[in-house]
């Protein structure tokens, strides 16, 4: 166990249990006064009686000798137990962490099979910043869950079906396949869509054709399907270009669009009917899940099949559940989807449970997120008021990063700079998205996200690169210091060491709430602790060899935690900047 907080908690547990006469949590937390604080006596006093301070004393008496892990224990305030870790204990734990390829991060006790539903842009429509968020957050969740030892299935539930394809196909035929492919191929998806929409609204003849085309599409007409596939394949080429630039794990093998579930939709209705859940409302087939009401407090239906016989978003999502649980055998379903779809997903969850498709032990979790805002606190738009083109946004990030690097490190060769700028620019955009609590909206601010100071990707990447350069300058192989046992003399070394040992806790906190920002906060604190260590403790010019090796060890471990942490966020760590 690398995390000293866990070791202390487990060593105090028997003492708390002895005083409580049964299991009791020591409630070990970080503290400003000491390394840690055990707060369990406060709660325990309520059940066993006596003052919390007395209870704390009894716990310490029962605990006996803890000197192998603690330098001091002190009862403070209303009954906290302040704990200071023993230096040799931290040193040994750190030495163990360094030789562990997982850097002390525990694997899940029970591996699960997890599907992560994320990105999910819509065919023939511009991918917007909401899809960017889903892609970036989803990618980090995939990496975290995988690192924990679970099996992850990525699913990109693209919007590739629906009545809009009627007008899109007719417009395609009007302009000619080649020209349409040209427009769509350069990613002008919105322009094409808008033009089709305009014609649909303006011309009765076009509207009729479009409607007939929808019927042909739903009926599986071969030529219509061929035309539909043009949209899907051109759009996925465009999506893939974005994924490639972002460096996310999604591939074509992960595509599991709405259309993939078409054959299951009749079955969804049949199964709901035979479960006795289906009702008719205004000609539509609906289910009323318990606990959902509209503004007027009337039961809210989930529309499974519309009055005209067509299926919508809800039916497909019910089919995803059946497919994931029954065919893919998953025990967790994670939906990385914007907060406005919370009610939709809650209803899918509720209906699937009522129908008995998911058991109590199957997790259905909405990993919701807020919007991306411009500096005017409104939805992010381009200067002309159009929706932002993601490719242009990513290009700008890399350009800006290149300029920032040129300023900071003018000597860096052109080619190297371009490579590093890619990592820093994309890293900055991703980190800005990941570092705040995902449920909140965030303001897209170039200067802030690309700053080399503060809770940003460039700051973390710079700390990492700086450490790499220490080793480069000294001509020392990093793996040579990895088996050393560090010695903690200076208080900054100690602070850094304790922080390093908290990596496991940080990863698990991020995992528990599917909250990558918790990992970001940790990495930022780590980089800050490293900065103050590095300012006060000479490394290459240390007073003697033992101190030098010990400090190089701290540098190496810090760089490894930074790189591993960034990797879990889907961000690269350049070796120079
Ligand atoms: N395509 C949808 C949109 O753009 C997101 C789909 C999310 N996933 C799901 N299974 N509903 O809003």
Image (cartoon, helix red, strand yellow):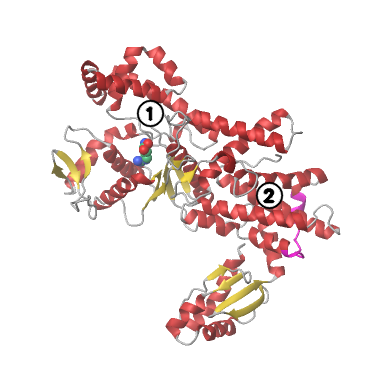
Q: Is residue 150 above or below residue 401?
A: below
Q: Answer yes or no: do the residues labelled 1 and 2 have beta carbons within 8 Å?
A: no
Q: Which residue is mark 2?
A: 559
Local packing at callout 2 (Cα closer than 10 Å; few below 14, some 14-19, many 20+) is: many
Left or right: residue 317 compared with residue 478: left
Q: Quadrant of residue 38?
A: bottom right
Tell me, yes or no, if residue 146 can be seen here: yes
- At horizontal 44% and vertical 49% (from top left) the residue drawn is 440
Q: Gap between marks 1 and 2, in whole Å?
A: 41 Å
Residues rendered magenta in the picture: 479-491
- At horizontal 41% and vertical 13% (from top left) the residue drawn is 179
- Near-viewer residue (495 or 275): 495
Instruction: Identify the disc placed on residue 123.
Output: 1
Residue 508 position, x and y percent, is 52, 57
- At horizontal 51% and vertical 54% (from top left) the residue drawn is 510
SS at mark 1 in the image = loop
Tell me, yes or no, if residue 99 can be seen here: no
Q: Quadrant of the N terminus?
A: bottom right
């Amino acid at each position: 166990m690398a995390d000293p907080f866990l070791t202390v908690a487990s060593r105090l547990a028997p003492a708390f249990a002895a005083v409580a006469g049964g299991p009791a949590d020591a409630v070990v937390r970080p503290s400003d006064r000491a390394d840690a604080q055990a707060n369990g006596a406060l709660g325990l006093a309520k059940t066993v009686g006596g003052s919390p301070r007395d209870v704390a004393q009894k716990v310490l008496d029962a605990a006996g000798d803890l000197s192998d892990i603690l330098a001091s224990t002190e009862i403070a305030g209303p009954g906290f137990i302040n704990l200071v870790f023993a230096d040799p204990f931290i040193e040994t734990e750190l030495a163990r962490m360094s030789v562990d390829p997982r850097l002390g991060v525990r694997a899940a006790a029970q591996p699960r099979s997890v599907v992560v539903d994320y990105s999910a842009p819509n065919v023939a429509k511009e991918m917007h910043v909401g899809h960017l968020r889903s892609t970036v957050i989803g990618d980090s969740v995939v990496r975290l869950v995988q690192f924990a030892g679970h099996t992850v299935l990525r699913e990109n539930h693209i919007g590739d079906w629906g009545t809009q394809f009627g007008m899109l196909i007719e417009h395609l035929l009007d302009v000619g396949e080649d020209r349409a492919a040209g427009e769509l191929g350069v990613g002008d998806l919105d322009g094409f869509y808008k033009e089709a929409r305009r014609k649909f609204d303006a011309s009765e003849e076009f509207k009729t054709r479009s409607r007939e085309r929808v019927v042909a599409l739903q009926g599986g007409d071969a030529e219509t399907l061929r035309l539909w596939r043009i949209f899907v394949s051109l759009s996925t080429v465009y999506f893939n270009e974005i994924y490639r630039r972002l460096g996310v794990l999604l591939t074509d093998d992960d595509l599991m669009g709405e259309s993939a579930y078409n054959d299951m939709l009749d079955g969804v209705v049949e199964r709901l009917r035979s479960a006795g859940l289906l009702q008719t409302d205004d000609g539509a087939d609906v289910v009323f899940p318990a606990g959902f009401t509209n503004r007027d407090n009337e039961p809210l239906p989930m529309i499974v099949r519309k009055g005209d016989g067509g299926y919508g978003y809800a039916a497909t999502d019910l089919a995803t559940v059946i497919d994931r649980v029954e065919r893919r055998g998953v025990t967790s379903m994670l939906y990385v989807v914007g907060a406005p779809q919370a009610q939709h997903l809650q209803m899918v969850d509720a209906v699937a449970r009522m129908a008995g498709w998911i058991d109590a032990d199957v997790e259905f979790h909405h990993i919701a997120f807020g919007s991306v805002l411009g500096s005017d606190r409104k939805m992010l738009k381009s200067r002309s008021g159009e929706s932002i083109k993601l490719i242009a946004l990513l290009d700008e990030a890399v350009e800006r990063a290149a300029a920032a690097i040129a300023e900071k490190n003018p000597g860096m060769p052109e080619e190297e700079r371009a490579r590093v700028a890619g990592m820093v620019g994309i890293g900055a955009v991703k980190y800005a998205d990941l570092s705040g609590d995902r449920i909140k909206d965030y303001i897209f601010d170039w200067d802030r996200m690309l700053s080399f100071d503060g809770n940003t990707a460039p700051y973390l990447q710079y700390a990492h690169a700086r450490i790499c350069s220490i080793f480069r300058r000294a001509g020392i192989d990093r793996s040579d210091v990895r088996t050393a046992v560090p010695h903690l003399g200076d208080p900054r070394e100690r602070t850094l060491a304790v922080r390093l040992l908290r990596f496991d806790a940080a990863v698990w906190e991020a995992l528990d709430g599917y909250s990558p920002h918790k990992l970001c906060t940790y990495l930022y604190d780590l980089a800050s602790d490293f900065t103050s260590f590095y300012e006060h403790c000479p490394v290459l010019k240390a007073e003697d060899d033992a101190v030098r090796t010990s400090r190089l060890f701290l540098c190496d471990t810090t760089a490894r935690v930074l790189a591993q942490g960034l990797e879990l966020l889907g961000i690269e760590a350049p070796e120079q900047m």
